[in-house]
């Protein structure tokens, strides 16, 4: 593929909207274009380099449309070529973008390696002031991981460099005033206090420090984007301190400000904070409306971190409801039912590959299979309910997998396969945090196998409930008429495949329960 052909492909990508907004066939076509381009980029070497400006544009466009994995590949290959050619300054920029792209995939270890590599390559004279930029991005990532001390050290390092930088040289090199970058870093430092306060159950002293820091930041010279972000952080700090009227006042102007400044990509955090405000006032229906808008906005503007924060708010609300009743399973059928249905609808809209209502169909099938198992002497009424809810929530961990990975069509790297296969463990952790420990175990087991070749733990001894949900999930996946990108199997074909795997892939008793349900005509053949 010539450079001109690469440019033609990159122009097609530049015209694409966010991938999450495309219809199924459009998404398939866009994925084909990206895959062909990525495969070509992988082949490039120092003997056949591609233009640095083209690499930069490609990375920015791929991140904009919501494919940070492809952006990482382009940035990493470009950085490697630049380093071989002795163009360290360009290599540092590309490594920094590779790190940010990895961060957007929640691949923190790989992102760390990119950031650290970039810092090692920066020359002592640092004519382009790259060290401050890399330190800031690395610090943002570490603060998201709650590594506050390391993040603070990086921010201090960046500020020291910025405060000593000759102003004219900095503007010429970076295209912005140093004060604007200082404002961004100070907002990030305020965000650290806010995150620490949340971890410490809304510690009042930490919230006060966050408020003081953010208010001081807002008094300085800031770029419009940073000002909106800092104001949103300040609103959340006030809300968590119990000053909901102050928070509401700040939030009331932010949506209009985002629209007037054409910063729609920041609306996600505004909507999320409005959802928090409504939840604090126990206006749950309205809280759901705002959080739905937050999630949709995060997908439209392809911000995985904001996407996952919006999902976390749903779980926080459900956790608050759980804390009010000792019978936590009953909460899911009572006060928490609307939140549970919201989570399932979010999963249905987010997971293009699985198809509509997969979770509800798995729950129904699991219940039927469990009824047969109960007749055979296993479990009581509460056990039946646990199996059904386990089927309903088996894929809930996928809500914490970035959209870009969850819906990938092109081949996954080993690292990406490993991350995707963590979703049972993520779901288990989410439910355990809610005190739903029995359900958590079922969810954590739904991709395990009796032969120990499953994931995430390679666990051979499954609970009866986990084994049933594992079979129900596999059967439904094979036969689902709405499963994207795959033709459904007829029920007889699917049950034959399940029977073939009995004893190795599937628990024999669970397979027997599935066979009984089908032979009794409950599912049709």
Image (cartoon, grey):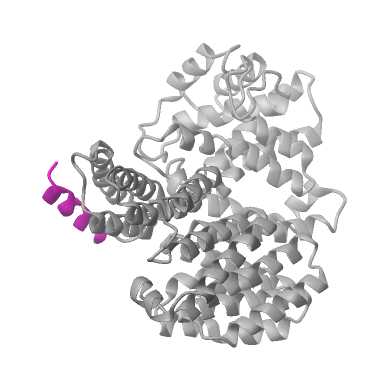
Judge whether 473 appears above or below 58 on screen: above
Specify the farthest residue to the front: 125
**Residue 37 place in picture, x, y as percent:** 24, 44
**Left or right position of 179 against 67:** right
Q: Residue at x 41, y 41 (%)?
A: 482
Residue 349 seen in this snapshot: no
Tell me: residue 145, above or below residue 210. Answer: above
Q: Is residue 13 left or right of residue 413?
A: left
Residue 261 visible in rendering: yes
Q: Is residue 504 left or right of residue 329?
A: left
- Taking the magenta stretch, the answer to whether it contains residue 275 is no
Residue in the picture at 48% in, 32% down: 477
- Looking at the rendering, the stretch of residues picked out in magenta corresponds to 1-14
Q: Nearer the viewer, residue 522 or 83?
A: 83
Q: Nearer the viewer, residue 307 or 499?
A: 307
Secondary structure character of the magenta stretch overall: helix
Displayed quadrant of residue 353: top left
């Amino acid at each position: 593929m010539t450079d001109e052909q690469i440019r033609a492909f990159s122009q097609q990508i530049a015209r694409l909207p966010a991938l999450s907004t495309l219809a199924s066939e459009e998404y398939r076509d866009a994925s084909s274009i990206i895959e062909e381009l990525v495969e070509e980029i992988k082949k490039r070497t120092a003997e056949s380099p591609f233009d640095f400006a083209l690499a930069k544009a490609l990375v920015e466009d791929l991140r904009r449309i919501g494919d940070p994995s492809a952006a990482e590949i382009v940035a990493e290959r470009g950085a490697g070529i630049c380093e071989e050619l002795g163009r360290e300054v360009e290599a540092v920029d590309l490594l920094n973008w590779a790190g940010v792209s990895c961060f957007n995939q929640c691949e923190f270890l790989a992102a760390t390696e990119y950031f650290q590599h970039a810092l090692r390559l920066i020359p002592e004279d640092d004519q382009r002031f790259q060290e401050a930029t890399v330190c800031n991005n690395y610090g943002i990532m570490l603060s998201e991981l709650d590594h506050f001390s390391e993040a603070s050290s990086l921010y201090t390092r960046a500020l020291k460099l910025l405060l000593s930088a000759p102003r004219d040289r900095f503007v010429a090199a970076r295209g912005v005033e140093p004060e604007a970058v200082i404002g961004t870093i100070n907002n990030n430092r305020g965000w650290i206090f806010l995150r620490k306060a949340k971890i410490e159950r809304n510690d009042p002293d930490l919230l006060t420090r966050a408020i003081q820091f953010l208010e001081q930041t807002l008094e300085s010279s800031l770029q419009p984007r940073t000002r909106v972000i800092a104001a949103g952080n300040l609103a959340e700090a006030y809300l968590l301190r119990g000053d909901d009227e102050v928070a509401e006042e700040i939030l009331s102007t932010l949506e209009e400000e985002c629209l007037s400044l054409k910063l729609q990509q920041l609306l996600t955090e505004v909507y999320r904070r409005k959802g928090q405000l409504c939840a604090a006032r126990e206006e749950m229906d309205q809280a759901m409306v705002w959080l739905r808008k937050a999630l949709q906005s995060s997908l439209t503007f392809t911000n995985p971190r904001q996407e996952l924060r919006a999902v976390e708010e749903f779980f926080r609300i459900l956790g608050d409801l759980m804390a009010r009743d000792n019978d936590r399973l009953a909460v899911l059928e009572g006060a928490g039912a609307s939140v549970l249905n919201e989570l399932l609808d979010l999963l249905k809209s987010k997971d293009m590959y699985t198809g509509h209502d997969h979770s509800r169909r798995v729950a129904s099938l699991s219940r039927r299979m469990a009824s047969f198992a109960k007749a055979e002497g296993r479990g009581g009424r509460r056990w039946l309910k646990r199996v059904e809810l386990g089927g309903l929530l088996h894929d809930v961990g996928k809500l914490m997998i970035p959209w870009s990975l969850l819906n990938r069509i092109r081949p996954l790297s080993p690292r990406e396969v490993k991350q995707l296969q963590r979703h049972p463990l993520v779901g288990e952790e989410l439910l355990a945090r809610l005190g739903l420990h029995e359900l958590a175990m079922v969810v954590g087991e739904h991709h395990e196998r009796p032969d120990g070749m499953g994931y995430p733990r390679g666990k051979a001894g499954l609970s009866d409930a986990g084994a049933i949900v594992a079979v129900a999930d596999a059967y439904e996946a094979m036969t689902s008429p709405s499963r994207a990108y795959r033709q459904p199997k007829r029920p007889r074909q699917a049950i034959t495949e399940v029977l073939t795997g009995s004893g190795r892939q599937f628990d024999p008793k669970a397979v027997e329960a599935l066979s009984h349900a089908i032979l009794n005509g409950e599912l049709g053949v």
